Every structure is written in C-alpha cells, then in structure tokens.
Amino acid sequence: MTRSLDLSPAPGSASLAAQVLAQARMEFRLILRNGEQLLLALVIPVIVLVGGVAAADRVGLDFDRPVIDVLAPGVLALAVMSTAFTSVAIATGFERRYGLIKRLGTSPLPRHGLLLGKAGAVLLVELLQILVLGAVAALLGWEPEASGWPAAVLVLLLGTTAFTSLGLLIAGTLRAEATLAAANLVYLLLLAGGAVVVPADSYGAFADVAAWLPSGALGEGMRAALIDGRLDGGCVLILLGWSVVGATATARTFTWE
C-alpha cells in the first residue's frame, strides 16, 4: 500500500515559543562573542572574587565567617547586575541606534517576544556565570548553605527582573553613547558603594541607604540564603518594588526607534 505525498503549501510562522527560543539562543551567542560583554559577565566578577579573598587582610575585610563564604554570594549578585543591567542597557541602546529593533518589527517576532528572548538570553548567561563562579569559589574553599539555594534562586530571579527593567529604562530613553556612559557609571557606583559584594553594615552610616538599593537588596538576599539558609523577606519586597517601578517606567517611556 502506498501513500501519496501532501505537497500543498502550509504558510505560517513558527509558534511564539519557538520564536522566543530562537531569539534567546541568538542573543546568547552574540553575548559570548562580544569581548566587552564577557568582561562584564565573567572576567570582572572572577577578579573581584579572587582579589577580594587574596587581599581581605590588607584592605581590612573582617567578618565573623570565612571571607570566601561572605564574598561568593555577593559576587554572584554582582554577576547578575553585570548581565541584567549593564550588558542589557548597552546592547539595547546600540540596537536602537542601528535600527536593529526597528527591523525586527518586520519579522513575525512580536515586541513582547523580543523582550522574552532577551530575558531568556540573560538567564542562560547567568546560568553560565553561576557555574563558573561557583567552581572558582569552590576551589577557594566556599561552603554555601545547601538549604538556601531555593531562596537564592528566587532572589536571583527577582534581581534579574529589577535590573533588566532598569537597564531597559536607560536604554529606551537615552542615546546610545549616553546609555553606555550611564550604565557603566551606575555599575561602578553600585559596585563600590551599593552593598552588593560586601554586607551593607560595612558601610557605616550609609548602611540603611545601601540596603534599600536594588544592589544592596540583591546582595543581602543572596548572603541570607547562602550563608544562613533563609529567605530574607525584606530584600524580596525591595526587589519587587524596584521591579514594579522599573517595568512601569520602561513601559511608559521606552521608544523602539
């Protein structure tokens, strides 16, 4: 018994899930091929982690726990900030400048699909960061609290949402050159004074302010999860607040061209 072939045309686009997955894979590959993006995503966090442990005594880092146990959760938070905020802001800013986003508007991929694709690429990069930084920290003697990983994942996801929305807010309102300068400046300021790598109480009188920053909430939440094995509800609420503010402002101000 033979079956006849059906050669009739079947026009139509792929499903939204397939389009988003393809967009996420493409964005992920572009990040890995970009030297500046890799510098922000992996090189700087690794330098901060190794340098912080090596120079802890000289710079006066004195904790009641091993230095690596305190710095490793903060460096994971720093890595999330690097990718979700700085990388997203710079990449999106120049995509707007060169008209890439405008041209994507002629494809079947809808605008929300483009944003979901970017979010998927960010999550893939963060997974790579966790694997690399976790391996480096383990070699340095890191012993995280195993029961805290579910809380750490929740805090990382909330931090990703907050910083991605803030990165898109800058990229969607400023020119590409201004976005590049602003994203790097904010990144350096939060790295130095945002309580992301070291605990907020290390900042003295500035501790209360630092804890309310998205970087402070992300860092404190990661330390609570991976040092004490608990979910810090206050940090969760702060990150939720920054996510809502960032997403709302971005939705009202973002221009695609």
Image (cartoon, rainbow, N blue to C red):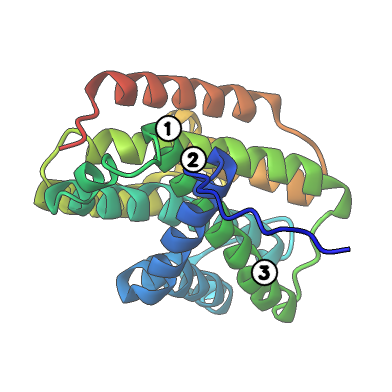
Pick the quarter of the image with the C terminus.
Answer: top left
Across and down, in percent, residue 88 comes to: 35, 50
| Residue type, label 3 | Leu
C-alpha gap between disc 3 and disc 1: 29 Å
Tell me the crowding category of disc 3: few under 14, some 14 to 19, or many 20 or more residues within 10 angstroms, Cα based.
few
Q: Is residue 173 at all visible to an observer of this figure?
A: yes
Q: Which of the pair 205/11 is nearer the observer? A: 11
**Dots 2 and 1: beta carbons under 8 Å?**
yes
- For the point 47% across and 75% down, the residue is 47
Q: Is residue 184 left or right of residue 57?
A: left
Q: Nearer the viewer, mark 3 or mark 1?
A: 1
| Residue type, label 1 | His
Across and down, in percent, residue 97 comes to: 12, 49
**Dots 3 and 1: beta carbons under 8 Å?**
no
Residue that numbered label 1 is attached to: 112
Residue that numbered label 2 is attached to: 116
| Residue 99 to residue 68: above or below | above
- For the point 70% across and 75% down, the residue is 135
Q: Is residue 97 left or right of residue 85?
A: left
Q: Nearer the viewer, mark 3 or mark 2?
A: 2
C-alpha gap between disc 3 and disc 2: 23 Å
Q: Which of the pair 41/70 is nearer the observer? A: 41
- For the point 42% across and 44% down, the residue is 194
Q: Which of the pair 117/86 is nearer the observer? A: 117
Residue at disc 2, secondary structure: helix
Residue at disc 3, secondary structure: helix
Q: Is residue 78 at all visible to an observer of this figure?
A: no
- For the point 45% across and 69% down, the residue is 29
C-alpha gap between disc 2 and disc 1: 6 Å
